[in-house]
Amino acid sequence: MRLIFCSFISTIFFLILLSTGYAQPPANPQSGTELRCVVDATWPRKTEGFEWAQMPGITLDSRDQVYIFTRSRPDVQIYKTDGTFVRAWNSGDPSGAHFIRIDPDGNVWTANITDHVVRKHGPEGKLLLTLGEPGVAGADRGHFDKPTDVAVLPSGDIFVTDGYGNRRVVHFDANGKYVKEWGNEGNRPGQFALPHSIVADSAGRLYVADRENARIQVFDTSGKLLAVWENIVTPWGLWMTKNQELWVCGASCVKKEGTDEHIVLPPPDQVLMKLNLKGEVLLRIPLPKTAVPPGKPGELDWVHGIAVDSQGNLYLGDIQGRRAQKFRLKP
């Protein structure tokens, strides 16, 4: 009876948000054009002696250099789009590597779920700032519990999704001073089951992949809820293009039989989607899923991170596949 009542209240709350414009009805996940990805099996030319492990993080800088964040040493590795190795460094405990981002000034940010910190590095790897206390989990202003991702605005404001242990977004100013936070555990609008990834658009709106709730939630920088996009995709990783299109990697929305719980692990399939900023599907791209590890080139297994270069090439990192791959789109 209590569960029925909670579900009823959640539904009423969402309808109120919908009527006020804070939430939007989900786009039809079949409405996007279907393309396929063709792998570039020659990318990258990995340096001898480097090993890749699980590959959760991948990003690009303004010169289209590809930064990968892998759970081995060195955990940060940089390659050109032609596969040439550039440089590498160690940022912390590699077992906790999660997402990696480049801020508007070219600095490199890493979120580490084992160290419980977010780190800011210069382009050459020099440590500039640490948010959180290394090795210490917590839920106060100075601690995280397995933070997952970070978005940095042109103003320097920092937004951290925190994460596996906590269920919140934490805002810091450009100097790393705590400003505020929002969110708690749940499935109502504005709550999180797992805030897994975060990106920002040019207007400063924040897009959060609430993975276990199989939805993307949109907020302004004050934490005000602007939209809830449900039943489009189970989002693992997000990427915002300069053209203000949102790429998502993850899986199709599939619920466990007889329940409202989404299947997340293992994912039922592998899929990419490109959305506009209204939450409408522009492209839907199914990906070959590895049947028997290790996978073949072009196959994905727990796709986790996504980045798109200036030419439209896609770079994907996965967990079970333990690699980063480059793809181009083909009808």
Image: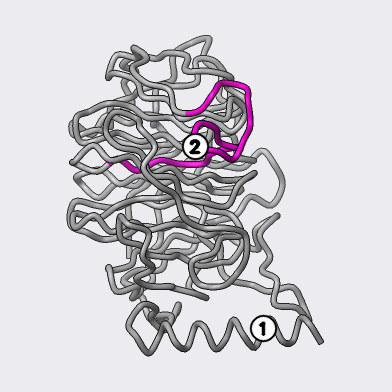
Magenta stretch in the rendered image? 132-152
Residue indicated by mark 1? 7
Tell me the quadrant of the picture where the C terminus can be found: bottom left
Q: Is residue 17 magenta?
A: no
Secondary structure state at the residue bearing disc 2: loop
Q: In the rendered view, tell whether residue 198 sits above or below residue 226.
A: above
Instruction: Give whichever of 35, 70 is nearer the camera.
Output: 70
Query: Tag 2: Cα neighbours inside 10 Å, few (<14), some, or many (≥20)?
Result: some
Which residue is painted at 69% across and 77% down in the image? 260
Residue indicated by mark 2? 141
Image coords of residue 236 (percent x, y):
52, 53
Indicate which label's residue lies in the foreground, 1 or 2.
2
Q: Quadrant of residue 258?
A: bottom right
Disc number at residue 115? none
Residue 69 seen by the camera = no
What amino acid is found at the position of numbered circle 2 in the picture?
A: Arg
Image coords of residue 112 (percent x, y):
53, 30
Which residue is painted at 36% across and 24% down in the image? 120
Measure the alpha-carbon separation of dots 1 and 2.
32 Å
